[in-house]
Amino acid sequence: MSSPDADLDASATAATATPAPGPTPGDGGSARGGSRARRPRWKRWSERSEVERVDLYTRQSIYLLLWSSAGFILWRGSADWGEQPPALVALVVAAVAVTCALGTPVVRDVAALYPAARPVPWRSVGPLLAATAVVLLGDRLLPDGLRGVGAMAALSVLSWSVGGLRDDRVSAALVGGFGLVFWATTGLLVAGLGAAGVTAFFVFTARVSLWLLGVVSELDRARALQADLAVAEERLRFSRDVHDVLGRRLSAIALQSELAARLSERGDAAAAATMLEVRGVAHTALREARALARGYRATDLAQELEGARSLLDAAGIAVALDVADLPTAWHEPAGWVVRECVTNVLRHSAATRVEITYAAGALVVGNDGVGPAGPGPTPGSGLTGLRERLAPLGARLDAGTTTDGDGGTGRFVVRVSGLDSPPAQAAS
């Protein structure tokens, strides 16, 4: 037969167990790519998270540079096309367009792979390499006015797409190979060095852009893990409180009940008195359990504010505090509000600033985690339970989204009013 302490230890272990976090936008490999593949393409800018916006901006920028570089090369080369056959000109333009079309999915696959360097997405890279080889070979058969334009455009596409791979050997092969190709084609060392320099710039820009995307994704993943850690720590604190408060009482009940049973077997009149003691201990344990369910334990506002500042600072969220005039009688309920709101910000918001203020009998906790014209968070069970705990004290909790008058960034605000009068009664 297990002891109450052992049973409580097992319950605490089960309570603190949390599932492993699933794939996030910062995960590398197929998980990261798979999550992006399921992302609705029609999602508006205001509906995207910060990481999704950076992801979209980075991809679209590389796509634009890939196509515009090839188009610029064609435009500069068109000055010598005056007497060239229209069919050959159309062939060159079509060949460049095909390489751009083949390079676009390479950028997508390389971005999904980052920051890993393997495995190389040959399904998209292979056709691009084959098309580039055909363009380079066919370019040697063109007349002087058209020669070189298609080759330069195809090589720029290859630099923007394959150059994003996080592999120094690939980068060195692109830079050195293109330099050698232009040196051999023109016979000028300056031309080869210039081609190598331009290629190095393309590769550097692609890799740095994807590196920044990876950094933002990792920061977002760290922020999610920070929120999960805060929840896990709170569960651990609660399990410790349950063990400390109830473990001793349950052990006393078990021992006194066993003693009462033995006294009763002997017909000892002290058995009744012992059972009354058991009842008293049980009532005490019940009161302490209710206190735990009501608020885990007595809440200190100063500690909650300091903990909130520490957690939000760690998540990169600015904090503004102004609660010096809050009546002392409302400090513990205010601590409940701060704890719940900060947890919600960490778990459900994309906020960059949180404000906790008290004025005119109202405690206000606001954050700017609502995008322009966005729907904003929906008050969940945590705020509902908090509203039910505050109502008997005479306080009213309201939560919702507000927007700037000019339609700018919105704010999610939790407002607790009625704090200018003393609490009506203790929370039950």
Image (cartoon, grey):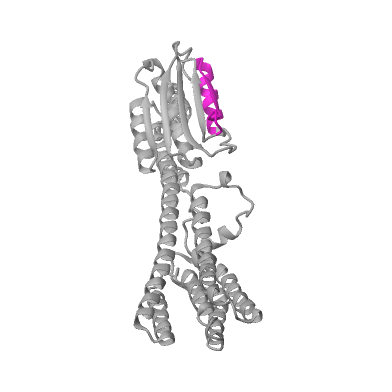
Is residue 428 in view from this perspective? no
Q: Is residue 153 above or below residue 232?
A: below
Q: Quadrant of residue 381 in the image? A: top right
Total number of numbered labels? 0
Q: Is residue 246 above or below residue 27?
A: above
Say whether residue 151 is left or right of residue 5: right
Of residues 333 and 89, the one drawn nearer to the viewer in this rendering: 89
Residue 21 in percent (x, y) is at 49, 53
Of residues 12 and 32, the one drawn nearer to the viewer in this rendering: 32
Q: Is residue 59 magenta?
A: no
The single residue placed furthest to the right in the displayed view is: 87
Residue 262 in percent (x, y) is at 43, 32
Say whether residue 195 is left or right of residue 125: left
Please tell me which residue is depicted at 42% across the width and 38% down the height of the picture: 234
Residue 149 in percent (x, y) is at 52, 77
Q: Quadrant of residue 74 in the image? A: bottom right
Please tell me which residue is depicted at 48% across the width and 69% down the height of the picture: 160
Residue 59 in percent (x, y) is at 52, 60
The residues colored magenta run: 382-407
Please tell me which residue is depicted at 39% across the width and 84% down the height of the picture: 183
Q: Is residue 408 above or below residue 119?
A: above
